[in-house]
Amino acid sequence: MAIAAHPELGDALRDVRSRTLALIAPLAPEELERVHHPLMSPLDWDLGHIAAYEDLWIVHRVGGGALLRPDLADLYDAFETPRAVRGEIPFLRGQDVHDYISAVRRRALEVLDSVGPGDGTLFELVVRHEAQHNETMRQALFLAGLPGGRPDDGPRPSSRGGHDDGWIDVPDGAFTIGAGPDGFAFDNERPRHRADTPAFRIARRPVTNGTWLRFCEGGGYERREWWSDEGWSWKEEYDITHPEGWSAGGPIREDRPVMHVSWFEADAFARSQGVRLPTEAEWEKASTWTQEPLEQVGEAWEWTASPFTGYPGFVANPYREYSEVFFGDRYRVLRGWSWATEQRVQSPTFRNWDLPERRQIFSGVRLAKDVP
Ligand code: AVJ
Ligand code: FE
């Protein structure tokens, strides 16, 4: 990537930190230390993890310095310490974690001043890592019913109306998928390459809560024929009857895109309509199809039919555990972004992923179908 200006990266670090701190500002110490949901870390763990990552990649790797707290490295390593056990470990709490994140930040800014940003990649990685953890923290806030876990109720500027009908026709033919060689991109977005799709149709707008409510009322969660085998067992085992976060009376806003549905639910919903989920190639092609834009991208992540794999010629870089360890047929790709995604990490080439049963993420559905 081209030489990035320092002030810009310094500002980006400060900007994302002020967002992190704003998220936790309304919370009591007890709410920061607690495990709110077995899938989520305590929020204080996220804070320490953000700083440990910054210390490793900027102070140690860019600056060549020793870690501030080598004793904490394993505790804040996402692979050494999986989410399920994070409630029981001695992560830093309260003032201790605030002191730690501030001390690391001072060291990182000193490196930016003395060594410079290099090609900017590692600084950008650290800024985006913190931004991604802000979204993870919002997932925990959502599951805990705490402030910051749901979007504002006001109208969204990207929304033209409450209907989720209407299809965009995208012709067959080759197009370019993935991030180009310049600028920052995560490893899994590269290399950019030619891809091809047959002609397809993709929904102009995501599926709304109102439409999903009619799916529920029409036996959506009872009709075996709409569910995959794996999806049906998951639904039965956990007694799933509606998206996560609905109240007893249903969704709060019927005109908003449905959120907190799993891939299994998204797939069953699509089948109930006689259609399917888009592949990620279709999604990216449609998102750059200038004749007719996809509407309401960025309210909720959009599940695709595609498993998470490396593009042809994939090279892990520079943070090896970011993508490669998740490649295979288990994880599914989500495209777009959500209301909780910071602008800096919003990109039409960005690939998110999660397991097909997960719905703590701000995940929704945009349908696609073949052209007959
Ligand atoms: C890209 C959102 C799937 O949260 O697992 C944060 C981002 N990686 N710390 C995740 C991430 C390491 C990642 N996702
Ligand atoms: Fe992380």
Image (tube, helix red, strand yellow):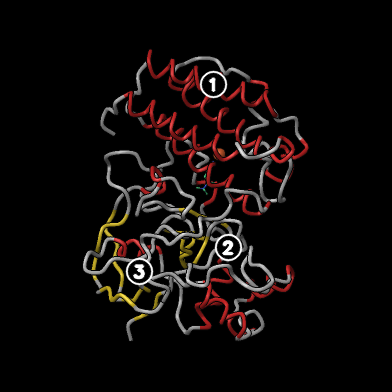
Secondary structure found at label 3? loop
From the image, tell me which residue sits under label 1: 104
What amino acid type is highlighted by mark number 3? Arg
Q: Earlier in the sequence, mark 2 or mark 1?
A: 1
Secondary structure found at label 2? loop
- CA gap, disc 2 and disc 1: 34 Å
Residue in the foreground of this view, choosing between 62 and 146: 146
The residue shown at (53%, 36%) is 20
Report crowding for label 1: few under 14, some 14 to 19, many 20 or more residues within 10 A (C-alpha).
many
Location of residue 236 with respect to 100 vertically, above or below? below
The residue shown at (57%, 46%) is 136
Residue found farthest to the right: 88
CB of mark 2 near ligand 1 (< 8 Å): no
CB of mark 3 near ligand 1 (< 8 Å): no
**224 sits to left or right of 368:** right
- CA gap, disc 1 and disc 3: 44 Å
Report crowding for label 2: few under 14, some 14 to 19, many 20 or more residues within 10 A (C-alpha).
many
User: Residue 39: percent from the left, percent from the top?
Assistant: 67, 51
From the image, tell me which residue sits under label 3: 160
**33 sits to left or right of 161:** right
What amino acid type is highlighted by mark number 1? Val
Location of residue 183 with respect to 281 vertically, above or below? above
Report crowding for label 3: few under 14, some 14 to 19, many 20 or more residues within 10 A (C-alpha).
few
Location of residue 24 with respect to 157 vertically, above or below? above
Marking on residue 260? 2
Secondary structure found at label 1? helix
Location of residue 57 with respect to 179 vertically, above or below? above
Residue found farthest to the front: 154
